Image (cartoon, rainbow, N blue to C red):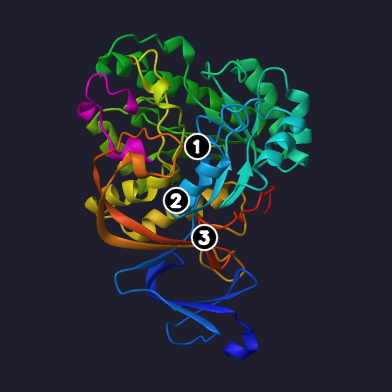
Amino acid sequence: MAADLGLALVVRARRAVVGGAERAVAVGVRDGRVAAVAAYDELEAPDVVVLADDEVLLPGLVDTHVHVNEPGRTEWEGFATATRAAAAGGVTTIVDMPLNCIPATTTVAALEEKRAVAHDQVHVDVGFWGGAVPDNLGDLAPLHDAGVLGFKCFLLESGVEEFPPLDPSQLSAAMTETARLGALMIVHAEDGALVTDARGTTYDDFLASRPPAAEQRAIDLVVATARRTGSRAHVVHLSAADAMPSREGVDLTVETCPHYLALAAEEVPDGATQFKCCPPIRPAANRDRLWAALAAGDIDFVVSDHSPCTAALKRGDFGEAWGGIASLQLSLPVVWTAARQRGHTLADVVRWMATAPARRVELVGKGEIAVGRDADLCVLAPDETFRVDASALQHKNAVSPYDGRTLTGTVRQTWLRGAPIDLAAAPRGRLLRRGA
């Protein structure tokens, strides 16, 4: 059978997440893609890799919410360090956000500049979001034709002047255009009228400055606009369980993030700006409701919202510090540590962090161990614990709310298209276009 298939590689795993369940498999690889999935002893090839008994084979994770920040703010991160961190964390595909870089990805020229910078640096595969801002309605179709995976907009100030927010009429115009294009509009949904300035070192004051009602009102606007225009829509980084949207009559999905599932407001010390993100980490009771929504399918998937910056920008009080959490390398163990404590399985984690995001953004070769998909794989030791040392992470800046925490689940190896990723070797990731 192996000779007929012409397999170059077989990976045998006593435990693997395939087809939404965990079982023993042999995965046959040819030309960088999965060519066969069979019983453990069924396939042969010139190269056979056997996983250890304490390891589980997962598909490479797909993180559709990553701020790489290059070009323009490469001191915050950059394609080399971001994709190294992704590979170290079992993530084989990221989708880069259109803001925090300069220029913002709101024109084809800016997209091509970003692709040129990224081209020889990426250790994993990278796709790109386009941006929707007040003055670029005419740029959406060209960006769509150039292969962006969809469009990102804000409904309040983004924190960087190059990426202004849309007002309700501008959102309607942009979503009318994305409906015409068949494109996905992803939205940072907070209502700026309900957000106040928070100064000082007290986390409770910062939390109060961005209430759940700000998310609820903005998400209601997104739903109403999607219903009226027929646009596909996606709500990014939901933090407030009270803001869970109604989906009746709309093509709408929702994501949340590891920090909302693993951290709680009660645990954030005053002055600990490494925990600052927008929308904020909310109380433990809210966290419990997010987990319930994830289990029920009301939240569709989990992505990092990796939003790093320099250590200097995290200094000061909660009003001054940059609002973002760097977690790309740690997303899998953070989620798995919390998920297993709540009775969830690795199959659940794979659905939330690989399969569902890949499907929503139409990355047809990603997110599953299945015939025809890219042989992107993650080898996880799910019972092995480690203590986070922020200075040892691949991220450019050693700032993390998880520093010193003990997490469960060690990524021992990450494979891209049938070969282990070697961070000491030349990068071999690809730049993806819509439909890849």
N-terminal of the pair, mark 1 or mark 3, is 1
Residue 267 inside the magenta-drawn segment:
yes
Residue 293, image x, y percentages = 35, 42
Q: Mark 1 points at which residue?
A: 247
Q: How far apart are marks 1 and 3 (CA)?
A: 40 Å
Looking at the rendered structure, the secondary structure element under dot 1 is loop
- The amino acid sitting under disc 3 is Ile
Q: Mark 3 points at which residue?
A: 421
Q: Which residue is drawn at 30% across and 61% down?
A: 382
Residue 369, image x, y percentages = 51, 66
Q: Dot 1, how many residues are within 10 Å of its Cα: few (below 14), some (14-19), or many (20+)?
A: some
Residue extent of the magenta highlight: 258-274
Question: Which of the two marks, 2 or 1, is nearer to us in this view?
Answer: 2
N-terminal of the pair, mark 2 or mark 3, is 2
Q: Are marks 2 and 3 in contact (CB under 8 Å)?
A: no
Residue 111, image x, y percentages = 71, 35
Depicted 189 relative to depicted 141: above or below: above
Q: Is residue 335 left or right of residue 220?
A: left
Quarter of the image where the N terminus is located: bottom right
Residue 417, image x, y percentages = 58, 64
Q: Which of 436 and 377 is in front in this view?
A: 377
Q: Mark 2 points at which residue?
A: 353
